[in-house]
Structures are given as C-alpha cells and as structure tokens.
C-alpha cells in the first residue's frame, strides 16, 4: 500500500511530514479556489525535500501545468477536472511525467468512461463527487470499486480518516489494483496544514 498526503502548503509542515512519515507522494494543489492553493513562492523552499511531488490541477492549461512541473520539480500530474484523454496524452508526451486521471464518484459508477484513458494514464484516482471538485471530506460508496474492471492501478481518495483504517485494509485485500490511498482534509489542523502525529499513527497502522 502506498500513501499520498495531499494539500500541503507550509514548508515546516512539509519538512515534518517528509522526516516523520516519509510518504510515497506529497500533493500540491494548483487550483486557485481551493483553500490549499499553492503560490509559486513555495517552490524555492521545498525544492530539495526528498519526496515525490504530485501537482493537482482542475482544468488548467497545458502551459500552466508545464510551468508548475518545471518550477516545483513535479514527478506526477493529477488531473482533477474534466480533462480529455487527448489532453492527458499530450501532457504526458510534453512533460514525460506520470499522469493520473481523477474520476468523481456519485451514487453509481460508469466504468466505460475510463476506457479512453486506460492506455494513456499511469493511474486512476477515485474521489467523492462534489461541486468543489475535491477536498470535500466526504467518502463515497466503496462497494462500487469491487466492480472495477481494468488492470490500471488506482488510488482511493475522498474523506479518508483514521477511523477508516480497517475498512481500507479490507478493501485493498479484495482489489489488487488498489495501489494506495490519498489523504487530505481529515488530517488537517487547518486547510493546508496536516497533523503529522495523526498521519503517522494512521500510516504506522496501515502499512503493517
Ligand atoms: O483539497 C482541495 O482543496 C482540492 C480542490 C480541488 C481539487 C482537489 C482537491 N483535493 C483533492 O481531493 C481529494 C480528496 O480530499 P478529501 O480527503 O476529501 O479532503 C484528494 O485527492 C485531494 O487531492
């Protein structure tokens, strides 16, 4: 199981996360309406931290994403909006980075929607449907994932909290394509700042 901690924006908090938890990825949100939005000024102070960085974008342009990839040294790009398969493909060719496509899950899931992306993206990510696009703090019905039909790995996201640890373990045991989890608002002391001891407690339990 792999861990992504998303919505980081404070250099001291990021340093603590990297030293204490050593997650597989850290997420930076480049969506201006988000309370976790990251300004360019952060790039210099976190450039040398030894953690893989994922940039989260919502319907951003190719130019904007390419600029952030260079400035922040991003390792992966998470497309959290309505980006087309053609856009994802061009982005992968242009940047050479890992590309993740997010699908927001409501009451039902239409797996056909994923097919045009499956030979392009490195990973899918399933988050709960919300008008704010992400960071809702709400879970969706994970039973839907038991019908996931593709070999492409995916990440589970959307309102994950410490009380879900056992259910997450159970789900991963049933679905081998589930490569990891993405945590965010349920581990915050305020938007963009994580409770590192809580993240550590959760991850120490889950990774065993
Ligand atoms: O966190 C945000 O503000 C955000 C805004 C726009 C798009 C994505 C965002 N975050 C992503 O949302 C999911 C789930 O977060 P939560 O656990 O429900 O708070 C996570 O993948 C973040 O990358």
Image: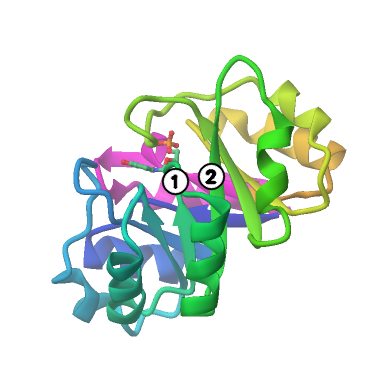
Q: Quadrant of the N terminus?
A: bottom right
Residue 176 coordinates in the image, percent (x, y): 84, 48
* Above or below: residue 169 compared with residue 25: above
Residue 169 coordinates in the image, percent (x, y): 74, 39
- Tell me the magenta residue range: 181-208
* Above or below: residue 47 compared with residue 131: below
* Above or below: residue 165 compared with residue 205: above
Q: How many numbered marks, from 0 up?
A: 2
**Where is mark 1, residue-wise?**
80
Q: CA distance from mark 2 to mark 1?
A: 5 Å
**Where is mark 2, residue-wise?**
102
Q: Is residue 98 left or right of residue 110?
A: left
Residue 180 coordinates in the image, percent (x, y): 65, 51
Residue 30 coordinates in the image, percent (x, y): 28, 56
Residue at image point 57% right, 53% down: 85
Residue at image point 84% right, 41% down: 173
């Amino acid at each position: 199981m792999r861990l992504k901690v998303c919505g980081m924006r404070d250099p001291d908090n990021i340093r603590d996360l990297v030293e204490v938890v050593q997650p597989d990825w850290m997420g930076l949100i480049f969506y201006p309406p988000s309370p976790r939005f990251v300004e360019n000024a952060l790039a210099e102070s976190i450039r040398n931290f030894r953690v893989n960085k994922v940039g989260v974008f919502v319907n951003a342009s190719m130019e904007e994403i390419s600029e952030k990839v260079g400035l922040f040294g991003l390792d992966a790009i998470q497309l959290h909006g309505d980006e087309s398969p053609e856009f994802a493909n061009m982005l992968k060719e242009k940047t050479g980075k890992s590309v993740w496509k997010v699908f927001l899950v409501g009451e039902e899931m239409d797996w056909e929607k994923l097919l045009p992306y499956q030979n392009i993206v490195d990973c899918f990510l399933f988050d709960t449907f919300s008008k704010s696009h992400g960071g809702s703090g709400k879970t969706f019905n994970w039973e839907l994932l038991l019908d996931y039909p593709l070999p492409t790995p995916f990440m589970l996201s959307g309102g994950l909290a410490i009380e879900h640890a056992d259910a997450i373990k159970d789900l991963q045991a049933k679905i081998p394509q589930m490569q990891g989890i993405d945590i965010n608002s349920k581990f915050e002391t305020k938007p963009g700042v994580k409770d590192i001891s809580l993240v550590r407690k959760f991850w120490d339990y889950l990774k065993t």
